[in-house]
Image: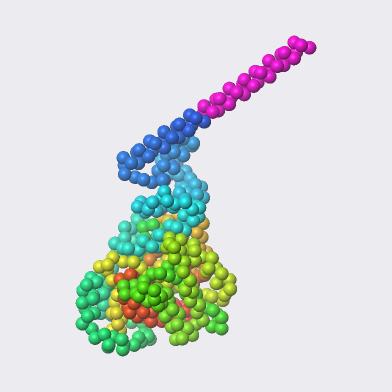
Amino acid sequence: MGVSMKKGRLFDGEIHIGRGILRILLIILCVMAGIAFLQELYQSAKAQEEEGEHRLQTWLEQSVQNIWLPGLSVLQPEQRKADYNLMDRLVLENMPVFLYSMEQPEEYDKESVKESDYAQLLLLEGTDENRKDIAEGSLEYGEDAIHLDKSLEEAFLAENGLAGENRPAVEEEEAMEDVDQQSQQELVFHEVEEPVYRYQWENLKDYTELVKAFYAIDSTTVAGAELLNTEKLLSKDMRMQGGSDEPQILIYHTHSQEAFKDSIPGDESTTIVGAGEKLAQLLREKYGYNVIHSTEHFDDESRDYAYSNSLPALEQILAENPSIEVIIDLHRDAMPEDRRLVVDLQGKPTAQFMFFNGLSRTARSGEIESLENPYLDDNLAFSFQMQTASNEYYPGVARRIYLKAYRYNLHLRPKSLLIELGAQNNTVEEIMNAIDPLAHIIHLVLVGEEPDVD
């Protein structure tokens, strides 16, 4: 009996010793893996510094594949690329903070970012639209984007006898000094009753030709023929469906504090909000629409989160007014001081405007599932038909449609617009003059007949 108990204790002791050894081995393996991980991270960072590259994508590929999935390192290049695309989907899209870091401009301080992953995308969305300090023709286009052909734009400017867009600001101001200010104020805007230019759509059914004629595609995104198809863009019915007994149009300002060259501090009527109020009044009084103009501020503390700040307020307005069909987010652009967005329209200095679309997809990583937009095709058709009306009735007043990567709250209604009206170096007079043709263009599309694309 005593011998048996002694043997049992010895056996139990051996088990405990074995378990202890296993624990030690596991600890050693974990330490070795950690050391290997840190070594790989250090080598990767050192290599990136020597090559002048600071991309999270390189670190992810090397560290994850070489240490935790070493089998991927021995695959053929074609197989490795395919598996990396899979990893890109599984890791980058499900952890948007990585996507954020990859797409963010290098000068941005990534260490200061402390919000959630989804918030990072919203922050990038805000700063991305905000970075509009270069001309469309100066963009560094990716391989899937098409450089602009200026010939059509120049033809539009010539049609109205315009030369304002590329004229230096000083020269523009000197020219305006020679004009009788009183006679300028007496000029009244007259709606153009018939198009002064008509597109030959049979020549614009090719994707390449369509982009050259209408779009500026930023290098952060990619479009493609499945999105930009002439027949699809023109055939969508963008006419107003409901009556004016209930709200039909919502105008608001993600960046309500955007001002102009001679805006008066503290006077909101001389800012983009004042421009929005004139647009609302024209649409109400001249064209008979039921318009809500929200003057709520979403950028008091910072512009960066203005889009995420505005979303709950917009959703509440739409819940309270489900009859709203059209949403217009009115902004002003930012341009180099030596480039002014102004043309002469019917004898009046008039700021140019631009329709802006977010595609919810990046050129690097494809669709951004967390920024889904079920109305993307409708948004694109709406801005395209606005651009067509602008060019046919008031050539030169509209710049090219600008396409960027993110969503910009355009997912709330099929007929959603983001409009960049002039820039910081336009005068309030130029901005207010532009509201007249803009209101008429909106009306033309909302009451228009479906175009014939045959």
Residue drawn at (36%, 45%) of the image = 54
Whether residue 278 is visible here, answered yes or no, is yes
Residue toward you, 355 or 363: 355
Where residue 57 appears, x then y in whole percent?
A: 41, 45
Q: Residue 19: name its quadrant.
A: top right
Q: Name the quarter where the N terminus is drawn.
A: top right
Residue toward you, 59 or 294: 294
Q: Name the quarter where the C terminus is drawn.
A: bottom left
Q: Is residue 415 above or below residue 115?
A: below
The residue lying furthest to the top in this view is 3
Residue drawn at (46%, 39%) of the image = 64
Q: Residue 417: name its quadrant.
A: bottom left
**Quick check: 345 left or right of 86?**
left
**Quick check: 95 left or right of 356?**
right
Q: Which range of residues does the magenta coloring cover?
A: 1-29
Where residue 326 appears, x then y in whole percent?
A: 50, 74
Where residue 450 appears, x then y in whole percent?
A: 47, 78
Residue drawn at (36%, 79%) of the image = 432
**Quick check: 125 left or right of 427?**
right
Magenta highlight on residue 23: yes
